Amino acid sequence: MIQSNIHKLIPFNKLFKLLLGFVFILQLVIITYNQLSGYYAVSEPTHFISRLFLGTLLSLVAAFLIAYPDLYIIRYMNRRFPWSRKIFKRILLQLSLTVLIALTGSSLITSFSHIINPYKEAFHSVMVTNGLIFSVCNIIIMIILEAWIFFMENAESKKKTESLEKELSQIRFEVLKNQINPHFLFNSLNVLSGLIDKDTNKAQEFIDEFSHIYRYVIETIEKPVVTVQDELDFIRSYIFLQQMRYGRQLEFSVDLPASMMHQYLPPLSLQLVMENAVKHNLVSEEKPLRIELSYHNNHLVVRNNLQPKITGARSTRLGQENLIKRYKLISSEIPEFKVGTTHYQATLPLITPENDEHTDHRR
């Protein structure tokens, strides 16, 4: 499990190519410096190639021995000391651990090499020199790993953001399309036409609530969340229009504590559930439709008696799927929709404001 998490930072094949390129360049620099300084001259091309190959191979093994501990350190630091905070503490601690890993690896490799083929120089002098070389090299490797991980995470984050924006735009389009449903407009205008001749005051009230609905849709369609209070004000306008059409045949009751009015949910969530209840159930004097809105365990519960229409539009569940997608973008919980023998119930999770403050997220 830990190994797989490390590979999520940098996959093995990419790490292999990175370290191979690094140690190959390093060996070229070392061999060239030794040649120019006269410390260790290369007599012929085959000697150069064999030294380069052997040095690269041994250095690659050593690089892996220190690179994986480096990745563990980066993963630990990202969790405990992210770059967004405690930056100086992270730099000091990460630098100390980087040098410690280098010195440990250098000591083991130098001791092992000395046992196989004893050094002509003083052992402690070789130990110090190799320790310095390993420390500098590991600091460079750590910087490269950090930069590469940052680059990959930034690219992945940008890719996810673009994907989410595209999906969110599609969801918003579907939500907006549902709100300007021609059937709803046609039925509403029919009701308004009848009210104008019978009761001008009711007609004016109908127009006010109708305009409130579409103003709310326009104002909130780009927002990820709204308060329960705002959503409840909107749904009362929506139910008002429906009750003007159905009269006492449509009953709506609310039982919500005042303490949860400043919690959040995606805009137009309640409207979707209410619309489905009216759309897929009989509403008549003999069988009135009762919709109840209540609160339970940090969830809004919308419940209605089940009396399906014999004929009518078949549910595509598109609205429910869009609502679930909208929740997934902002919450770890998703809505639940249950069909019982006598009732249908929708449960919508509420999102608690950070620090329990009544912050207005509608900006």
Image (cartoon, helix red, strand yellow):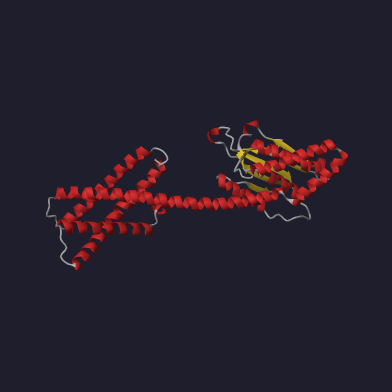
Q: 161 or 345, which is in the foreground? A: 161
User: In this orientation, does residue 281 appear?
Assistant: no
Q: Residue furthest right?
A: 198
Whole-percent x, y for residue 200 in the image: 84, 37
Q: Nearer the viewer, residue 45 or 238?
A: 45
* Residue found at the very far front of the displayed protein: 36
10 above or below 89?
Answer: below
Residue drawn at point x = 85 percent, y = 43 percent: 194
Q: Quadrant of residue 345?
A: top right
| Residue 193 located left or right of residue 221 | right
In the rendered image, is residue 87 in sight? yes
**Which quarter of the figure is the C terminus placed in?**
top right
Q: Is residue 193 left or right of residue 60?
A: right
Instruction: Return the x and y of residue 176 as percentages of the image width and height.
Output: 67, 49
Q: Determine the residue positioned at 22% across, 47% down.
A: 132
- At 75% from the left and 39% from the top, the residue drawn is 209
Q: In the depicted view, which residue is nearer to us: 185 or 354?
A: 185
Give residue 72's position: percent from left, percent from top.
Answer: 36, 48
Indicate the position of residue 260 as horizontal and vertical percent values: 62, 34
Of the pair 55 and 71, the residue shown nearer to us: 55
Number of marks present in the image shown? 0
Left or right of 29 on screen, residue 144 = right
